[in-house]
Amino acid sequence: MPEAISLPLQGGGSGRGEGERKADLLPRLGGFARLLHDAGLEAGPRRLTDATRALTLIDLKKQEDFRSALRAVFVSRKDDIATFEAAFDIFWAPPDPRASAGVMPGRTRSLPMSPERAKAWANALGLNTSQMNREQEPRTVPETSSGYSAEELLRHKDFEAMTWQETEQVQRLLAQSPWRVAERKTRRLRAARSGAIDLRRTARHAIRSSGELMRLFNKRPRLRRRPLVLVCDVSGSMERYSRVLMIFAHAIARREDLEAFVFSTRLSRITRLLRHRDLDKALTSVSKGVHDFSGGTRIGEALADFNRRWARRVLGHGAVVIIVSDGWDRGDPAQLTAELIHLRRSAHRLIWLNPLLGSDGYQPLTRGMVAALPYCDDFLAVHNVQALDDLGRMLADLDIRPTRRR
Amino acid sequence: MTAPASIDEVERRLRERRYIGDRGLATSIFLALKLEKPLFIEGEAGVGKTEAAKVMAEVLGARLIRLQCYEGIDLAHAVYEWNYPRQLLHIRLLGEGEDRRTAEREIFSSEFLLRRPLLDAIDNDDATPPVLLIDEIDRSDEEFEAFLLELLSDFQVSIPEIGTIKAKKPPFVVITSNRTREVHDALKRRCLYHWIDYPDLEKEVEIVRARAPEAAEGLAREVAALVQGLRTMELYKMPGVAETLDWARSLAALGATRIDASLVDATLGAALKYQEDLERIRQQVPALVEKARGA
C-alpha cells in the first residue's frame, strides 16, 4: 500500500525543529507509528493516542525526553528496543545524505522490513535506501572460527528446493504420530474426587448446613504439559537431516509448547519463525533468519550461549531439553562437558538425539559424543519417522518411568 | 505530598531518596502517573526494579502494597478469602433458633473477609492512593495474568456475596519481571514499558556512593570498575547492582579503602553466585584488580 507513504512528511530535514507546533507534530507522529508498525512493533490507535497524550505532558525541546516518552509507549519488550531506536533515528533525525558521519556510534541502523517497504519509506523520508538499512559493520566471520572459514561461509540454505511431495509425506507422517509430552504437577489446585481436603469448598458447604460438616471436598494439583526445548545442530555434517528436522520442529510447534533453537557456529532462536501455520512459509522464514546453515560445528560454544542467554528464560516449569546432533564437534570437548553438566542441572530431562545411531555398527566415538554421553539422560536415534515416533512415546511416558540420574 | 509536576521533579525526588536512575526511567514514571497507566519494568536481576517502586511510594508519600508473585498464586492469595474457621464458629454459636438467612448475611460481611493485597490496593481509605507493586509477575501463570488484565483495566473487583468494589482513585501500579518467561502482550499493552539496563561506570559509582556511603570514594570506584569488568566476561549469572552494593559494603566492613587481590578473592562470593563462575574468575583476580585500580 504505497499510498500510505504519501504522508505530509518533511523528510530529510533536521526533524523536529524548535519552532515546530504541536499541530504539525500529530501527522508526523502518525507517520512514525506507521513506520514502527511496518518494522513489526505494535503501534495501533490505542498506542498512538497514548503517545499523543504523552507528548502534551513533556517538554518537546528536550530530545532525550521526547525519545524516552515514545519508547515508553511503543516498546513493550526488550527485543524491540533496538528496532525502536533505529526507527527513531531514521524518522526524527535523518542523517544528511551527503554526510557520512550521520550514524550514531554503536547503534545499528537497520529495520526488519521487506526491501520494498524499506524503499518506499526511504522515498517518503528523502533518504537513499542504504541509509534506511545499514548495518554498522559488515557481517564478518567470527575470529574464533578462522580455522575453518571455508565451512563457515554463512551460506543461505535453500529450503525452497525441497520437493513438495517429500515435504507432504514427512509432514503427514509426523502429523499422525501420537505426540503428547508428559505432564507435570503444577502448584495450582483443582477440585478432585480424592486428594487433599479442600477447606474452602468444605467450609462453604458446611455453612449452608448450619456449620455441620456434612461432606468433605478434595483437591489435587492440576497437571500441565511439560515445555519442550529443541536445540538442533544444522552444521555441514547434519545437512542431510536439517530439512527434515525443521519439518519435525514445525510439527511439534503446532501442538506443543516448544522453544526451538538451531546452531552451527552460532546459536539462533527460531521459535517465532516456526509460528507460521504454513510449513513452507515457516521454513522460508527460518532459512532467511538463520545465516549459518551448514557451517562448522561448535556444540560447546552453542550450549554455552544457550546456558547464559536463554536457559533462565525457557527452562522454567520442568522443561525437557532435546539436543539433536551427530557429535562432530570441532570445539573444545572440556567446554562441551562443562556446559552439558550445567544444562542438565536446569532441565527436567536431557535427551540427545543422534541420526547416526540408526546406522549399523555405529559407535559413538566422535570427540563430541564421547564428551557428551555420560551427561545425557537418554541417547536415542533419530534417522527416520519411526525413530521420531518412538521418541514421542518415550516423552509421553516420561513421568511414569523416571530415570535414575547418575 | 503532591504528585511531581515534571520529569525533572521526578528525577530530583528519586535522587533525594538516593535512587539514582536514568532520565528514561524518570520519564516513564512521570508519564505513568499522568496517564494513570501501570508501569511495566523489566531488567536483569538486581538492577533496582523493586527498589524503584519502593522509592516511588516514598516520593508520593503513599503506602506501598506489595504482591510477590509465585507459581500457582490465585485469587484467594491475591485478592480476598473468606475466613472460614471464623464463619463456621460463628454460625454454630448462633444455635438452632436463629434465623438462618440473617446469619448467612452476617457471616458474608466484610468483618469475615480476609483482605489480600489487590483488594487492599483498590479498597482503602488512604488519602494518597497507594503504590501497588506486583513483583516478579513472570513467576505467576497465565490464569493469573488474565485476571490481572481485568483488574488493571477498570480497577474493580467483584465479590459475589458483597458486590462490586471499585477504586475511588486508582493506585499507581508497578509491575516487575525478570523475564524468566515472556509475559503476555495483552497485559503489556495496558502498561507503559521500561527496560532497566546495567548502569555505566560513572552511574554505578554514584549509586554505590549514595547507597553504601560507608565505602570510601576510592573503594566505591574500584568495586564498580571491577563489577563492570566482570560483566564483560562470559558468566552464567552476571552480577547486578545489588551485588555491587553488597560487595562494597562487605569490603568496607573489612576496613578496606582500596581493593587488592587477596581481599577480592576472599569476598568474591558477594558478586558471583555460581560455583563455575567463581572457579573461572578466581584465576583471573590479579589481572581484574589491576585493571579496576587503573579505572
Image: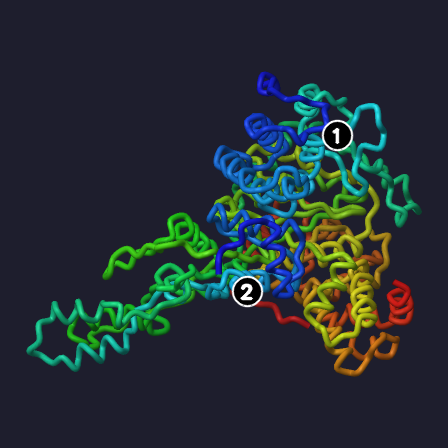
Q: Which residue is mark 2?
A: B54
Q: What's the residue at 68%, 43% (across, down)?
A: A64
Q: Residues within 10 Å of mark 2 (few under 14, many from 20)?
A: many
- Please name the amino acid that badge 1 sits on: Asn
- Taking depth in this image into account, of A405 and A338 the one nearest to the observer is A338
Q: Which residue is mark 1?
A: A133
Residue B47's tag is none
**Can residue B139 be seen at all in this image of the molecule?**
no
Placement of B67 over or under A21, stated as above or below: below
**Which type of secondary structure does the marked residue at label 2 adopt?**
helix
Kindly indicate whether the residue at mark 2 contacts the one at mark 1 (C-beta within 8 angstroms).
no
> Compared to A336, does A3 lie above or below?
above
- Say left or right for B24 vs B122: right
Q: Position of residue B36 (x, y in %)?
A: 46, 49
Residue B27: x percent and y percent?
60, 48
Q: Secondary structure at mark 1?
A: loop
Instruction: Please indicate whether residue A187 sits to the left or right of residue A131 in the image.
Output: left
Q: Give a yes or no on whether discs 1 and 2 share a subunit.
A: no
Q: Is residue A158 visible?
A: yes
